[in-house]
Image (spheres, coloured by chain):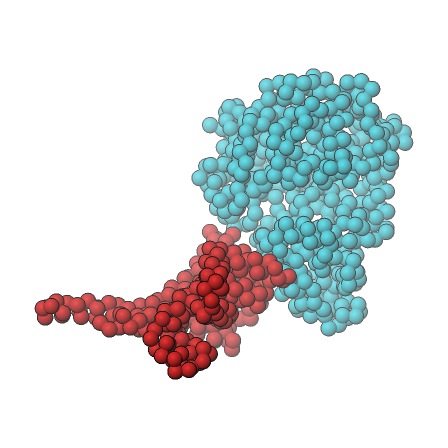
Amino acid sequence: MISKTEISRRSARGRAVLAALTASSVLALSSAAALAQDFDPQAVINIGSLYEPQNLDNTQGAGQGINEAFNGNVYEGLFVLTDAGEVEPKLVDSYEISEDGLTYTFTLKEGVTFHSGDPLTAADVKSSIERVTAENSASSRKRTLAVITGIETPDDQTVVVTLSAPSISLPYNLSYVWIVNDAAGDISSGEDGTGPYVLQEWRRGSALAMVPFDGYWGEEPTNGGVMFQYFTDATAQNNALLTGAVDIITSVQSPDALSLFTDNPDFTVSEGASTTKELMAYNDRVAPFDNATVRAALARAVDNEKLLQAIWGDYGTLIGSFVPPTDPWYEDLTGVNAYDPESAQQMLAEAGYADGFSFTLDTPDYDPHPVVAQFLQNELAKVGVEVKINIITANEWYTKIYKAHDFDATLQEHVNHRDIVFYGNPDFYWGYDNPEVTRLITESESVSSMDEQTEMLAEANRIIAEDAASMWLYLYPQIVVSTSNVSGYPLNGLNSQFFVSDIKKAD
Amino acid sequence: MSAEQTDNLTETSGRRRSRGNATYWLGLLLVGVIVLAGLISFVWTPYALSDMVGGRLEAPSLQHWAGTDRLGRDLFTQLMIGARIALIVGCGAVVIGAAIGVTTGLLAAFATRFLDDALAAVFDILIAFPTLLIAMLVVAAREEASLGTAILALGIGLSPIVGRITRILTKQVLGQDYITAARVSGTSWGAIVFWHILPNIAPFLGVNLALQFGLAVMAEASLSYLGLGAPPPNASWGRMLQEAQGTVYTAPWGAILPGLALFALVIGINLLADGLRDRFDPTKGAA
């Protein structure tokens, strides 16, 4: 048996990096918290966001906005991915794993009730997991939970999950599964969760309001409710913060917007750890991108530092690969295929493209992609590669590229935490197919300790970096801005989550 | 009518005339400057279009007359190339719009009652759609956005307006006695169109096409703003505006200058067209 303490023994390396990253902002925050001791427990916190959910059901393609608003606030999972990147038990009191790693026995917390008043039972957990793995579910986590072969409920407080293969990430993956009352029915416009907040009103196109749940089993929120206000335009969102219409904005989209808030004592600007990566994804199935030498040559032809400076000024980070510092298997790989236009030209010649070639870059029409595309066009022209920019909408991106794989190369921002697993799936849109990487990523699920998993995924990350599977440009900064009388909000926003129950607002 | 009244009349129309002249010359100046900038851009620009020659968002200076964008590219160079693109698109769209519009307009005017009504209805229906919307449909129907696609799309978008005006003007001319005289004396319809109709409708049509040119320039900027115009590295004022949107607080010149250029060209064209109408319009010129 593996004890439950295993889960908190996550890679010390990941934690150290995270701590270093957030050290400055934490310092800033603790002083802000000291100032905000006399908070108003009735204050309603207004949060500005650009991500309005399409509906309220995270298995029905609602978008990242629903995770932002509901994860940990309205719904809770058996486990929670904390803002610091730790996986901790939430609705699970304790759990045991069988020797072969194929059976998990979860004991649920006592005294948990849904917003409708029903108590939490094992049957709710079973139906909640099945909602995500159901055939008509559009959840992005469906694939990772496919190892579950059976869920049994011997009594109301016990859930036994059996797997077809060991899955060390199961608790992590379960942190995405909302526990929903099995009597709730359709939750695309309503809710019945166990979280500290109850949905009060959803005004489509503008706002989503939540108030504290009186019967909450855990600590009660430090505010009198929150209201997510949705904007379609970053400028309007910034103006709302400036005029006091909102108290916090969950992510800032450009350094130029920040200049309004830095050096202004009325606002607090905090930089957290980001998981959003800007990249040029090649279609690795088609020539010449099926050739690793060509991909590596292009990587060497582009000065990422200059690009990051152009887009984000002094913010943002170069990581040299797909794994951000918040993933336990992070490693600084900026030295692999580093900027070196001369060797880029030699490698292109070696690969048989001494005279260069030309390709179409499908570019989503929203910032920063068109500017990034022009930068790449300039840089690659210097080594004789012609880039034809084709501007497309987010919808076209989804159908043409993500679904139909009909493209040469494209630009995209990838927001997820722990998403290196995409490179282990040869059917993913970019079609990277390296049997060794697929093996490492698949087998890393079956190991018995986080250390082994970390080692294998770090190895996979080094291989994709050397293979230049995609062109990783930079890691976005994660910047949260609030008025200075508000504190206690999450900084990292891993997986778009935004826990609101500790937010305090001073008078 | 007393002598005094007559004097007053000539005085007011004289003043109107000179005011008309002033706006005409102002229009000519605005358009002239932009045409010149566009022409010069073929042989000379301060820097190469896509060279990242300066720092991020530099303010206008002696080195960079209009400042630089986020990638450190010279904005004055982009403005000059943008003028070229605006003129090419404007002329191209008007030529295509006129080719389609004048042909169908003439056809409608000459056609049987039934065909005429049908074509007139088609014009009206198409005009009910905003030009930009029609242009967007055409762009969407083509696989890739390009300068040619944008020109074609706007040309098609403009054609129903030109068609309707051509039809009305032609019908007016067809009702004149000299057309009947020409018919009676055995002149063919082709010769009538060529020798009598086109010369008579040309001044009015020309003024209208000038206005359509202004419309096409605006529509191209809108298309580019939406990302449906000529793709980079073509520098369109619309795309410059779009790219400057996020930095409007920190680097306002990036948005103000292309906006001003667009304003100057469109207002210039309109003033010019107004002035031309005053010159060609016999009912006004008589005073």
Image location (x, y in percent) of residue B224: 53, 60
Residue at 43% in and 64% down: B164
- Answer yes or no: is residue B130 visible: no
Residue at 59% in and 54% down: A365
> Quadrant location of residue B213?
bottom left
Which residue sits furthest front? Answer: B184
Image location (x, y in percent) of residue A442: 84, 43
Image location (x, y in percent) of residue A247: 50, 35
> Quadrant location of residue A494?
top right
Residue at 34% in and 67% down: B274
How many numbered marks are there? 0
Residue at 31% in and 68% down: B23
Q: Which chain identifier belongs to the red chain?
A: B
Q: Colour of chain A?
A: cyan
**Front-most of residues B135 and A452:** B135
**Front-most of residues A244 and B276:** B276
Which residue sits furthest right? Answer: A100
Image location (x, y in percent) of residue A97: 85, 28
- Please state, as top left, top right, bottom left or bottom right, where the N terminus of chain A lies in the image: top right
- Answer yes or no: is residue A237 visible: yes
**Front-most of residues A337 and B27:** B27
Q: Is residue B127 left or right of residue A222?
A: left
Task: Give the answer, above or below, for where A54 lies relative to A436.
Answer: above
